[in-house]
Image (cartoon, helix red, strand yellow):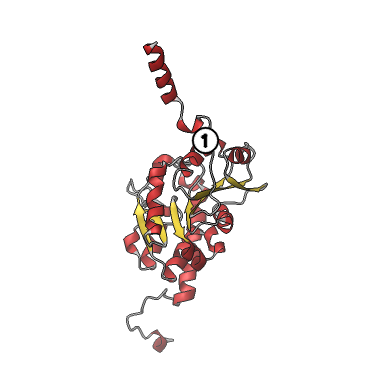
């Protein structure tokens, strides 16, 4: 009998926690925290993501923006109890963040991805930081740093932060999840800018929001790069253009030199 009990306990431990029965997302009627999860064909990881999301805060709602999915992602999200916003067609990178933010009711918005199961204990520091006064709580993750050649995305992140006068952020960026924002920051940035994460970060800094890299999660290890050949990765050029859009906004607001002086050059004298 004792042996059978031990085997039963061992068997229960071997079942992944999120695959155990009788759990559902419970969306609070007056949430303090909204957790936004864009998802496209992420059925294989979504259940684990939702299981952790539901444990982040006692007064929370979990919003899944299911777009362009053909693998049952939307159905699974509904079955797990999440609020679901469905779009038949793919929305494209980061557009789901805007859609989820527009539907969110919480004063703190936490953005995560559906293809990475991150434990709730690793997500709570972002909520805590915003609760304590940070407007934009970033993942303290700079990207892939190994090797002699600097990855173009890493270079873009460091460069933009330097131009914004925030070299202290290093490569921390709204391009990487998880990150959280206050309702104040969302209103200052504007929903449409959430579609272009570097632009959203630039606006947050320009509007005087308190931006801080609060907790490090090595998302590159959780979700490794799919393309070994950088030239084959379409995301690199997309993210580069996103950063150029952010630089353009900086120039529009701060002048042709982005707010930096010209050290007394009298170039008008030689024209």
The residue at the point 53 percent across, 44 percent down is: 26
The residue at the point 49 percent across, 74 percent down is: 252
Report the front residue among 238 and 118. 118
Identify the image quadrant of the N terminus.
top left
Where residue 268 sits, quadrant-wise, is bottom left
Report the front residue among 71 and 47. 47
On the image, the x and y values in percent for residue 188 come to 49, 68
Identify the image quadrant of the C terminus.
bottom left
On the image, the x and y values in percent for residue 157 come to 40, 58
Q: With respect to residue 103, does 49 lie above or below?
A: above
The residue at the point 44 percent across, 55 percent down is: 180
Farthest residue toward the top?
A: 1
On the image, the x and y values in percent for residue 30 come to 53, 54
Secondary element type, mark 1:
loop
Neighbours of disc 1 within 10 Å: few (<14), some (14-19), many (20+): few
On the image, the x and y values in percent for residue 190 come to 53, 65
185 horizontally vs 218: left or right: right
The residue at the point 36 percent across, 59 percent down is: 132
Q: With respect to residue 107, does 251 lie above or below?
A: below
**Residue beneath disc 1:** 23
């Amino acid at each position: 009998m004792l042996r059978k009990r031990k085997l039963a306990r061992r068997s229960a431990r071997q079942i992944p926690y999120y695959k155990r029965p009788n759990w559902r997302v419970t969306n609070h009627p007056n949430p303090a925290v909204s957790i936004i999860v864009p998802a496209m064909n992420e059925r294989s990881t979504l259940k684990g993501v939702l299981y952790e999301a539901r444990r982040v805060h006692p007064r929370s709602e979990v919003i899944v923006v299911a777009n362009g999915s053909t693998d049952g992602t939307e159905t699974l999200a509904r079955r797990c109890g999440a609020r679901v916003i469905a779009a038949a067609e793919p929305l494209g990178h980061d557009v789901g963040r805007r859609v989820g933010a527009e539907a969110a009711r919480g004063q703190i918005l936490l953005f995560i991805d559906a293809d990475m199961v991150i434990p709730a204990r690793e997500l709570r520091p972002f909520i805590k930081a915003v609760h304590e006064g940070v407007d934009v709580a970033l993942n303290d993750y700079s990207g892939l740093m190994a090797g002699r050649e600097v990855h173009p995305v890493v270079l873009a992140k460091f460069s933009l932060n330097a131009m914004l006068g925030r070299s202290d952020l290093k490569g921390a960026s709204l391009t990487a999840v998880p990150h959280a924002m206050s309702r104040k920051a969302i209103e200052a940035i504007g929903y449409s800018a959430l579609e272009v994460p570097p632009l959203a970060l630039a606006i947050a800094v320009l509007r005087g929001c308190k931006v801080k890299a609060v907790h490090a999660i090595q998302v590159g290890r959780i979700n490794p790069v799919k393309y070994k050949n950088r030239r084959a990765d379409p995301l690199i050029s997309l993210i580069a253009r996103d950063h150029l859009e952010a630089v353009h906004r900086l120039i529009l607001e701060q002048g042709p030199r982005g707010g930096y002086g010209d050290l007394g050059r009298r170039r008008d004298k030689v024209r």
